[in-house]
Image (cartoon, coloured by chain):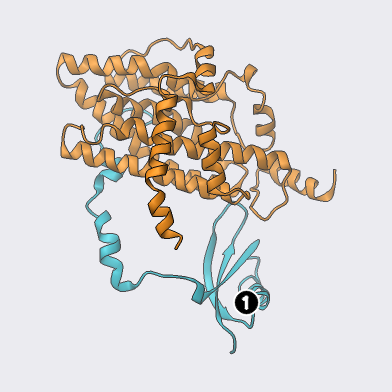
């Protein structure tokens, strides 16, 4: 298959986010969109498609998982359940 | 009515969402930009009254909590500015309209926070009122705004509970601490009721916004719901809520710029913006 790799995002219905569903190769943006429609939405999977060239995406590296995400681990006070308020309604 | 307009009206009528690439009436776009920007500005300006207490919070735990909360407000501002940008305005334009006074932020942030108990009261009452306002907005007709609100509401729950817990801790303390809590609640109760906006009879945009599905309830409906939810919480806490008779002229004065802290809030925002000039310059190279 020729052409650059594209990542495909589909919005399942109005009101929801576009969600990554897969990728494909295409010669240009228009073909990527057309092919994404054929490959990923044959059974009413969506109402809107985004295609983005994979080389336009900057991704974090799996090696960075710990420095990036571990610091949130001990910040339990960011969650509502950290606060003991007893049996008070609507809180 | 042409086909585009009919399509728009039908989408809204079946409580479906409008997305950025859809056609929309100019008035709908304008109303959304105004409302989302005002909301974003409120998050950003809203960092100030509590931020002032970060260095003076009485323990490391309270400092961590407050810092995390103020950090969330900054994040909420960013979610909302991004949602506004899908409507074809830039963040610079919105920032400029905030500073010129062309766009407003919530009147509540123009009240001072002279007491540490205010940190708790803001969490309980101000964030409580905000949650009341914002939960229905998760179902607002404009997709990006609704999705931003879903994230925000999830985080606001921590804000309200940490405030209530702080007040509860103070209420278990000394008489002086209990008096501090009551005094703070006395000052914030009516301004919190004003957060829902003027009474329905004086809110000319409400009907249009509801027909468009931007708002789901009227100001007075939400205000009543807030009072109803808060009353048992006040009882559990052991504080007395002042009456619900609000001076609506006060709201008008504060919104139009003549509140206790309006000038201070904008001056501080301008200072922060100016102090960040070197960062923007470095980032644009």
| Nearer-the-camera pick, B255 or B211 | B255
Which element type, helix, strand or loop, lies under badge 1?
helix
Q: Which chain is cyan?
A: A
- Look at the image and give the colour of chain B: orange
Q: Nearer the viewer, residue B211 or A84?
A: B211
Quadrant where the N terminus of chain B lies?
Answer: top right
Describe residue B33's horizontal placement relative to residue B279 as left or right.
right
Asked whether residue A68 appears in the rendered view, the answer is yes
Above or below residue B185? Residue A34 is below
Is B129 placed left or right of B31 in the picture?
A: left
Q: Can I make out residue B147 in this image?
A: no
Chain letter of disc 1?
Answer: A
Q: Is residue A91 above or below residue B257?
A: below
> x, y percentage for residue A44?
65, 65
Residue positioned most to the right: B1
* Residue B141 coordinates in the image, percent (x, y): 62, 43
Q: Residue furthest bottom?
A: A1
Q: Position of residue B268 (x, y in %)?
A: 38, 34
In x, y percent, where is residue B223?
50, 22
Is B58 drawn above or below residue A58 in the view shown? above
Residue at 25 percent of width and 57 percent of height: A71
What count of labels does the image hold? Answer: 1
**Circle 1 sits on which residue?**
A39
On the image, which quarter does residue B127 sit in? top left
The residue located at (38%, 53%) in the rendering is B279
**As drawn, is B105 to the left or to the right of B203?**
left
Quadrant of the drawing holding the C terminus of chain B: bottom left
């Amino acid at each position: 298959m020729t052409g650059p790799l594209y990542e495909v995002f589909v919005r399942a219905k109005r009101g929801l986010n576009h969600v990554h569903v897969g990728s494909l190769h295409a010669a240009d943006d228009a073909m990527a969109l057309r092919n994404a429609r054929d490959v990923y939405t044959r059974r009413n999977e969506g109402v809107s498609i985004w295609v983005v060239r994979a080389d336009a995406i900057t991704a974090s590296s799996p090696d960075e998982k710990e420095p990036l995400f571990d610091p949130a681990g001990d910040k339990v006070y960011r969650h509502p359940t950290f606060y003991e308020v007893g049996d008070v309604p609507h809180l | 009515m042409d086909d585009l307009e009919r399509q728009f009206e039908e989408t809204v009528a079946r409580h479906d969402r409008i997305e950025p690439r859809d056609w929309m009436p100019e008035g709908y776009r304008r109303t959304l930009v105004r409302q989302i920007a005002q909301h974003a500005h409120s998050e950003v300006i809203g960092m100030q009254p509590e931020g002032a207490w970060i260095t003076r919070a009485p323990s490391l735990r309270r400092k961590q909590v407050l810092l995390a909360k103020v950090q969330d407000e900054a994040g909420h501002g960013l979610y909302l500015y991004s949602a506004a940008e899908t409507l074809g305005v830039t963040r610079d334009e919105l920032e400029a309209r905030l500073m010129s006074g062309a766009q407003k932020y919530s009147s509540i942030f123009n009240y001072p926070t002279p007491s540490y108990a205010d940190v708790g009261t803001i969490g309980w009452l101000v964030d409580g009122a905000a949650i009341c306002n914002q939960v229905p907005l998760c179902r607002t007709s404009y997709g990006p705004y609704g999705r931003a609100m879903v994230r925000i509401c999830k985080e606001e729950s921590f804000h309200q509970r940490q405030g209530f817990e702080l007040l509860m801790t103070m209420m278990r303390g000394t008489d002086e601490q209990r008096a501090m809590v009551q005094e703070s609640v006395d000052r914030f109760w009516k301004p919190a009721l004003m957060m829902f906006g003027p009474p329905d009879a004086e809110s000319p945009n409400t009907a249009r916004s509801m027909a468009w599905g931007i708002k789901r309830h009227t100001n007075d409906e939400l205000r009543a719901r807030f009072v109803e939810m808060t009353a048992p919480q006040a009882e559990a806490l052991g504080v007395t809520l002042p009456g619900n008779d609000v001076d609506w002229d006060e709201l008008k004065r504060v919104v139009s710029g003549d509140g206790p802290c309006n000038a201070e809030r904008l001056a501080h925002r301008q200072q922060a913006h100016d102090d960040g000039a070197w960062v923007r310059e470095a980032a644009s190279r």
